[in-house]
């Protein structure tokens, strides 16, 4: 096994769901991790066990303001990711994506750091092509309620590629598809956390629309492996690359699956209005990641859901104490 070389790594949004798992993994590999987060949707609880680690540092900071630190690599994850949270203050969401990207790219340029952008399948909008390959330019409503996130992320991708072309900056752009797992915010409104929390509390399971819209759910550990492979030293490919699990389910199937795994639940499924611009279907084409990164998601939905359910049970027990 090759020994990991110790690097200084900045993770913006490091106290969030994905960021907290990434920080943990980077520490395990022996790196110095600087976690920058304004705690808008993230929480110190997600990184509580890391705070005493000698190689870990937490800095409360909003990436829409300049940041002067010295690092070797940057993972730019700062941005609320769930529709409920990114629509709460849409102007701030666009600022976080766009001003945040400019500041982190400026920082990367000054210190000559490699920088990875956590982009999203939302750049494809409500797609006419299924599954979505990286070559698809997308179908986004620029004035809809999801636009603050979708267009913000699209503009961030533009900035990354222009810093790459104009300044030769080593960039990586990853388009993340629906990801779930422990450390998701219990109230962030995303479908997996909503259904699991509702089922554990015996509340009604809220399926939006008729539940026939589809998503493909990726477990957090698979995503983190993909992010690390994309950033690896011998990796020259800059992206954009899709990271997601191509196993596609309807939302109604997901609801039934969650109930099957929590057999004691007294919850029943109810149907609610479909939110505006909710994509009908989404499934990644991951041929590029398979070929260029030798990456493949390995966690089945059932295993991932079990781990997530265990996490939310613990959270409930802790908060009941
Ligand atoms: P999250 O909301 O749990 O984490 C985002 C983190 O960014 C939070 O800790 C939040 O406090 C922080 N943040 C927000 N605005 C900030 C600002 N202005 N300055 C500093 N910190 C700020 O969401 P997540 O699921 O962990 O998503 C992480 C990244 O991955 C996001 O960029 C998101 O767009 C992207 N992504 C996630 C998914 C998914 O399914 N989870 C899918 C596609 C893309
Ligand atoms: N920036 C930063 N940290 C740095 C270097 C730059 O936050 O270490 C910010 C800076 O505020 C600037 C932005 O990044 O607004 C873009 O920097 P760049 O050097 O690309 O452009 P310029 O400074 O010319 O605007
Ligand atoms: N959804 C649902 N019930 C919920 C939360 C979400 O039916 O309680 C649906 C939502 O309308 C969408 C899908 O589940 O069709 C995924 O929603 P999520 O917010 O998790 O992610 P995104 O829409 O960004 O893919």
Image (cartoon, rainbow, N blue to C red):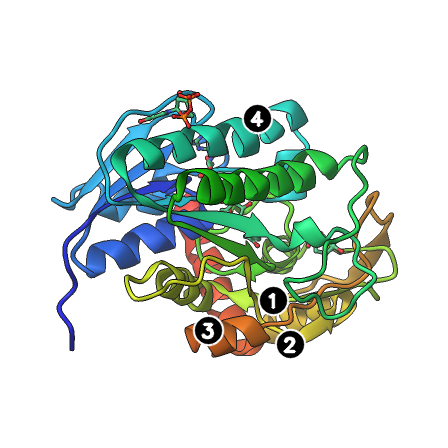
* SS at mark 2 in the image: loop
Q: Which residue is mark 2?
A: 247
- Foreground mark, 3 or 4, reads 3
- The Cα–Cα distance between marks 4 and 2, rounded to whole angstroms, is 33 Å
Taking the image as shown, residue 143 lies to the left or right of residue 283, namely: right
User: Alpha carbon of mark 3 to alpha carbon of mark 4: how far?
Assistant: 32 Å
Q: Indicate if the residue with disc 3 has its beta carbon within 8 Å of ligand 1.
A: no
Whole-percent x and y of residue 141? Answer: 81, 41
Q: CA distance from mark 1 to mark 4?
A: 28 Å
Q: What residue is rendered at 23% in x and 39% in y?
A: 71
Instruction: Work out whether residue 77 or residue 271 is closer to the camera in this orientation and state it.
Output: 77
Closer to the observer: label 4 or label 2?
Answer: 4
| Ligand 1 within 8 angstroms of badge 4 C-beta | yes
Left/right placement of residue 15 relative to residue 59 reads: right
Which residue is pictured at 81% across the width and 63% down the height? 213
Eye-nearest disc, 1 or 4:
4
Name the residue carrying label 1: 217
Toward the top, the furthest residue is 65
Residue at horizontal 25%, vertical 29%?
69
Mark 4, residue position: 95
Q: Is residue 173 visible?
A: yes
Name above or below for residue 135 compared with residue 87.
below
> Of label 3 and label 4, which has the lower sequence position?
4
Pointer 1 or 4: first along the chain: 4
Q: Foreground mark, 3 or 1?
A: 3
Q: Which mark is residue 292?
A: 3
Rate crowding at label 1 as few (under 14), some (14 to 19) or many (20 or more) other CA atoms within 10 Å.
Answer: many
Badge 4 density bin: few <14, some 14–19, many ≥20, Cα 10 Å: some
């Amino acid at each position: 096994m090759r020994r990991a070389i110790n690097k200084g790594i900045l993770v913006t949004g490091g106290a969030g769901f994905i960021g907290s798992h990434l920080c943990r993994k980077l520490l395990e590999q022996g790196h110095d991790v600087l976690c920058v987060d304004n705690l808008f949707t993230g929480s110190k609880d997600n990184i509580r066990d890391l705070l005493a680690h000698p190689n870990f540092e937490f800095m409360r900071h909003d990436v829409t303001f300049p940041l002067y630190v010295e690092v070797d690599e940057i993972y730019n994850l700062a941005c609320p990711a769930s529709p409920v949270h990114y629509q709460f203050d849409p102007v701030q969401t666009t600022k976080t994506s766009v001003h945040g990207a400019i500041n982190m790219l400026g920082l990367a340029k000054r210190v000559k750091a490699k920088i990875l952008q956590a982009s999203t399948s939302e750049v494809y909008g409500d797609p006419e092509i299924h599954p979505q390959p990286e070559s698809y330019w997308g179908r986004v409503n620029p004035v809809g309620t999801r636009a603050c996130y979708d267009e913000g992320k699209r503009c961030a991708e533009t900035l990354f590629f222009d810093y790459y072309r104009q300044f030769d900056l080593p960039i990586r752009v990853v388009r993340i598809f629906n990801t779930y797992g422990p450390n998701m915010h219990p109230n962030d409104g995303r479908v997996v956390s909503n259904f699991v929390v509702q089922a554990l509390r015996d509340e009604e399971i809220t399926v939006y629309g008729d539940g026939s819209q589809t998503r493909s759910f990726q477990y957090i550990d698979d995503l983190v492996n993909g992010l690390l492979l994309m950033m690896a030293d011998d990796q020259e490919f800059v992206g954009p690359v899709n990271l997601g699990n191509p196993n596609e389910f309807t939302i109604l199937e997901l609801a039934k699956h969650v109930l099957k795994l929590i057999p004691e639940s007294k919850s029943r499924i109810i149907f609610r209005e479909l939110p505006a611009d909710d994509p009908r279907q989404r499934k990644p084409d991951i041929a590029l990641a398979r070929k260029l990164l030798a990456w493949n998601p390995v966690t089945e939905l059932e295993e991932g859901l079990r781990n997530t359910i265990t996490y939310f049970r613990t959270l409930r027990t802790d908060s009941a104490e």
